[in-house]
Image (spheres, rainbow, N blue to C red):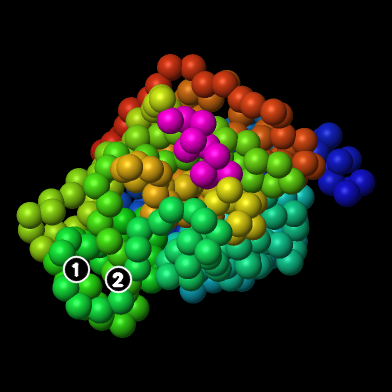
Amino acid sequence: MIYQINALAFNMKILLAEYAVGIGLNGTLLKEGGAMLKTLVDSFSRIGHEVTYLSSGPVLQNGKAVSSCKENFQSVLETEALCADAGLVIGPDELLANLSAIIENNTINMGCSSVSAGLCADKLECTRILQSNCISVPRIIENGPEGICVIKPRFGCASEGVRMAVSSNVQEGYIATEYIEGEHLSVSMICGKRSLPLSVNKQHIEIDCSKPGSPVIYKGNIVPFRTEQDQELFDVAVKTGRVLGCNGYIGVDIVYGKEPYVVDVNPRPTTAIYGLARTLRTEIGELLLKNVLGELPDAVSTEGEFSFTKDDFEDIV
């Protein structure tokens, strides 16, 4: 702890690794990953830290790119982590536990532990844990027709592979949950020794319940989105983070129907951070480093709101 306090007082070497940018994925995942990576690189750079990030080719305005690809992503991550004072990795939920372990074994991890990331990644186990702790979640449907339901990968990332259905009969590797009618929201927060909710966000989600098999498509966010239920949503998100042992920046996806239902927990930065950085009156990077020390403020403030779609990420990487 003495080392951490001293280190945070000086120019730190910060390592950031975003999987899509680091291995050279194409399409939506690259755009979203690039937006999150740039937001974090810019934030840590603005507060005076030396930032290194893994990249398969794209070069950002700030920070220093270190060459990586799919074949060597993990080995480069380990090498660079050894040279860093603190690190944070963003990746697909099913890979995040292993990638987080590399960070936590070689430097200060500003994100969720490998254990916590693994729990959040398993949608079935995560749902069961939350339910057992009296947190409202969509009911898992085991077999047979149940009306409209949601089919999603047991281990998945964002809305990839999520679709509507009228039967809960699913192939191996997928789960079925009841469909909750309501407003699609998320809570951005930082977890650690204490919890700091940052904002409630409205998710632009495209769903066509009339067409079985139609995908659930994430379009973008409004950040922050002010509701009369903000405190209730914050309380649910804080309890969720604590139950799952989360750390650092996380996103809790909620459908607000008769009450808030937690539908997904992202144990890493989410695309909402792109809008949050434009409305939060404190640097995200500063909050992440203060969280390492257990020195988060009691509250933060936002100014205005920022609406974006995935099309806004076109020219980032």
> What residue is drawn where x is 17% and y is 61%?
148
> Which amino acid lies under the numbered mark 2 shown in the image of this protein?
Ile
| Contact flag, marks 1 and 2 (Cβ < 8 Å) | yes
Residue pointed to by mark 2: 141
Can you say whether 210 is above or below 140 in the image?
Answer: above
Can you say whether 121 is above or below 289 in the image?
Answer: below
Magenta segment boundaries in residue numbering: 229-238
Residue 151 in the image, given as x and y percentages of width and height: 26, 66
Q: Nearer the viewer, residue 183 or 37?
A: 183
Residue at the limit of the structure toward the bottom, as seen here: 172
Residue 298 in the image, given as x and y percentages of width and height: 69, 28
Compare marks 1 and 2 and give the one earlier in the sequence: 2
- Tell me if residue 56 is in the magenta stretch: no
What kind of secondary structure does the magenta stretch mostly adopt?
A: helix
Q: Is residue 120 visible?
A: no
- Quick check: 307 left or right of 1? left
The local secondary structure at tag 2 comes to loop
The local secondary structure at tag 1 comes to strand
Residue pointed to by mark 1: 146
